[in-house]
Image: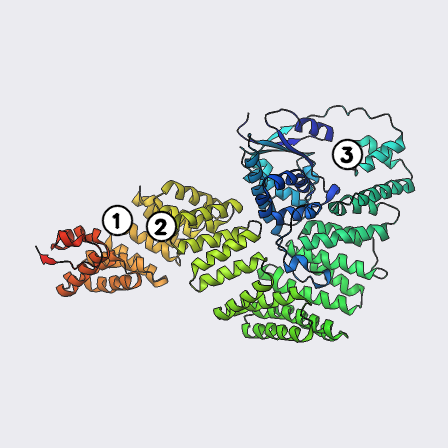
Amino acid sequence: MSDVPHQWIRARHQHDRRRLLAAGDEAPVLAVLDAHRRLRGPYSAGGALMRAVVPEALRDRPGLVASHETEILALTPELRGVVPATRETLTSLAVPKERTRFYSRLRTARIAHGLTEFLHGYLRHLGGGPRLLLVDNAHEADPTDQELLAILLRRADPALLRLRIATAADELNTPPGPLAEPLRPALERYARVITGGETRLPPLPPLSAEDLAARWVDGDCVDDDPRPRAAYEGLAPADRAALHEARADALVAAGEPSLALGAVPYHRERGGDPAGAGAGALRTALDICVDLGFYHATVDFAERGLALVDPATARQDWWAFTTKKTTSLAALGRPEEALVLYEGARAATDSPMVHMQAAYATSMIHTRYLPRDEQDHSTARAWANAAVAFAQAIPDPGERAFQTVFNRNGLALVAVHEGKLDEALALVSEGITWLDRSLEADEHALHRSVLKHNRSQVLIALGRYEEALTDLDDVIAVDSNHAEYHFDRGNLLRRLNRPAEAVVCYERAMALSPPFPEVVYNRADARLELGDIPGALADFGYAIELDPERVDAYVNRASLRYATDDPAGAGQDIGAGLELDPDNAPLLCLRGQLLAASDADAAHTALTGLVTVHPGYAPAWAARGAVSYERGELMDAIDDFGRSLDLEDTPDVRFNRGVAYLETGNPDKALADLSAAFEATGDPEAQLQLGVCLLKLDRPAEARSAFLRCVEEDPALAPRVEAETGLVLDSDRYGAGAGAALDVRHG
């Protein structure tokens, strides 16, 4: 068997792909999936897999299912009555009218990571070696399935799961817009290519042309055999429409919600009432997908819907298709296209509601979604003010209050980006007060929580951390399952120097959400602050597994590995990080430090190149200073340590320069550096060197006190005190531990 555990099967026709998919019996088959998005839209394959394995997993490993309920239910609404939903948030529960927050486009990647870990847990429980997952029509998969398959290819443990993925050709049908992990590069890197030749089409059953066409439609038109399609195209348009209507009716009667995202709208579009039932089915799919964060599919449904509706006669549907398409385009990194659509919308109607919503969205695009060098906060402010003006003209008092506050919240974001934090704080605070006064207690709970969360972020920017913590605590009290609130609370607690509590918050966020690298990375930093080196190393590794392009995780893990005497591991991380970011100063510095252990001259050359290119990076000067010190070039070392301290004053570099000053016979300057290093750290080693310095300055009483404290703090330093100073310590006393009254006399 090849060392590459996964296979990429390429063959033109479906019957050849499926023959190759089924070939061989090296492992039992977990599931056979059709990834064609026409079947069930987003996660056509992923949902089918969950429907196949979750019922058994729920019976045997209910805790495993519960820990991944968010991912499972996002893919398979059919399981909502089977898998308990215990992590609902104000976002997931909001009625459409009150939905003011949408998921990040990265949510689908988080879902894919969670499903990968669910499958690992399930397959470990099953035991018996690896299982095969057979997937056809991946070239026609929705981006959600493509992303899921890519992540499975990279992360799946081959001892548990091996994939065979079949496509019709090299090209995958992926719409514009980024994916966290696209499928094609993953197939090229992690799968062995098997190219199938064309074989004769299998014989057709003895059916009339009409029955052959009906059979093709009942298969949702995904079979690529040209003969049934030719029979279908030979029918009269009315007969084709009737077949689609019948198929749509049968699918609706099946009562499986995910069909509403794929085959049902496909058939309704081609049925007897495209502009009515067809547009309605597309609108249903659109609303579901935008709420779940399936933005590629939302764009697709919107474009198909806009082809069927007229803004003059179906304004509500037209505007829903338009604005949810633009929302999705912005989320997918295509804001320029969204701006064009809003210009067209303003030209197409005089509806104040449309103009208000378009003004708000245009403002957000200019202040948030455009590339940073193209953002225009002045233009954003103008559009935000226009949105507020439209809102203030709404007749209904409650709706006027809500829309005014909502749009002023957008203006607050513009103010934040302009650096006008006091204005932003006033806008958000006034909004909270206004809604509390104008609405019933149960109205717009989601947006009220969003406002208070936004205020906490402004307060953090203003350095008012305790007030921000109060707001976050209030928000968590009403929306306790929203993972990002716990994540933000953890970040704030770290600012308040409370890392142990921050770890608790990060772990709560991790329990509530599919995996995401930011929370793991931040927990690693907090664990590092607490001195938990193994935990920090594990978390940096997990963050890299979730996001292998996260350079800062490579930097931090490489630094830790270097500090814990793991040069091989540090070298691997340095190499991997530099592949992603060849000019990364911290990694280049670490590489120089690593090189110093074997070749000081080469290390000095490398670090000289680094300080030439990055003269503002303080650790590079410190690292070159350390190499110069080891080479005996003490004055060069002192100069380099000084350059580092001019950029960033740190006790370690102070200590190193102090020692270098001592060795060059300059105890006066050494005293200042060593005193500063000791005051900052309380390090017994710094205390020892400070004692040596005081002796050289002919201050024996102070030196004696320094040596006493040094050995009290670390009795293991006593032999060095004797060796380096000529003092003799009472061996019966200096080993007694910290706090012993040590007798010191000249030998």
Q: Position of residue 66 (x, y in %)?
A: 59, 47
Earlier-in-chain disc, 2 versus 3: 3
Callout 2 amino acid? Leu
Q: Residue at x 24, y 65 (%)?
A: 672
> 621 and 526: which one is in front?
526
Callout 1 amino acid? Glu
**Quarter of the C terminus within the rendering:** bottom left
Q: CA distance from mark 1 to mark 2?
A: 14 Å
Q: Residue at x 61, y 74 (%)?
A: 427
> 290 and 325: which one is in front?
290
Residue tagged by mark 2? 607
Q: Any mark on residue 630, and which?
A: 1
Earlier-in-chain disc, 1 versus 3: 3
Q: CA distance from mark 1 to mark 3?
A: 71 Å
The secondary element bearing badge 1 is classed as helix
The secondary element bearing badge 2 is classed as helix
Q: Residues within 10 Å of mark 3 (few under 14, many from 20)?
A: some
Residue tagged by mark 3? 223
Callout 3 amino acid? Asp
The secondary element bearing badge 3 is classed as loop
Q: Position of residue 615 (x, y in %)?
A: 39, 57
